[in-house]
Amino acid sequence: MADVDYEKIRKFLNENDHFCVQNGMVLTVVREGYAEAEVEIKDWMMNGLKVVQGGLLFTLCDFAFAGAANSYGKPCIAMCGNISFMRPGLGTKLKAVAQMVNCGRTTCVCDVTIHNDAGKIVVKTTLTGYFLEKKS
């Protein structure tokens, strides 16, 4: 989509998704149907077993999904998702890569994978989104 400003979408989400910003997450790439989000792992992100809290992992996936889903120039929100934890979240940084699988008129489906520093898969998710009607 030539008329969509991907950098504007990336900047908007990085500045306005306050929960993700407060938790150290950054969208680094947004292009049509694709996005990447990263977070540097901090001690306060760990659960009782000293691995990254699952809620933070799901939030990172959701943030990458937001970049990919909103890349079509229509506001989109997640309406359901599932997550599979493949291995513990450890290391210094985690990177989520979102790739749209299907984009319809009102809904979309996106796969998101989180990798650790070693390039190993930590999490796989599938999120379904709903495109909101633009209000005039």
Image (tube, rainbow, N blue to C red):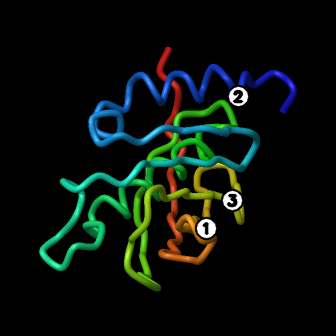
Q: Secondary structure at mark 3?
A: strand
Q: Mark 1 = which residue?
A: 111
Q: CA distance from mark 3 to mark 1?
A: 5 Å
Q: Is residue 33 left or right of residue 111?
A: right
Of callouts 1 and 2, which one flags the residue occurring earlier in the amino acid sequence? 2
Q: CA distance from mark 1 to mark 2?
A: 19 Å
Q: Mark 3 = which residue?
A: 99
Residue 16 appears at what percent x and percent y? 38, 24
Q: Quadrant of residue 11?
A: top right
Q: Amino acid at mark 2?
A: Tyr
Q: Mark 2 = which residue?
A: 6
Of callouts 3 and 2, which one flags the residue occurring earlier in the amino acid sequence? 2
At 37% from the left and 63% from the top, the residue drawn is: 58
* Residue situated in front as seen by the camera: 50 or 74: 50
Q: Amino acid at mark 3?
A: Gln
Q: Secondary structure at mark 1?
A: strand
Q: Is residue 104 left or right of residue 108?
A: right
Q: Dot 1 surroundings within 10 Å: few (below 14), some, or many (20 or more)?
A: many
Residue 94 appears at what percent x and percent y? 49, 59
Q: Is residue 130 left or right of residue 68?
A: left
User: Vertical placement of 20 versus 64: above or below?
Assistant: above
Residue extending furthest toward the left: 48
Q: Are marks 3 and 2 in contact (CB under 8 Å)?
A: no
User: Vertical placement of 54 versus 40: above or below?
Assistant: below
Of callouts 3 and 1, which one flags the residue occurring earlier in the amino acid sequence? 3
Residue 123 appears at what percent x and percent y? 48, 75
Q: CA distance from mark 3 to mark 2?
A: 15 Å
Q: Are marks 3 and 1 in contact (CB under 8 Å)?
A: yes
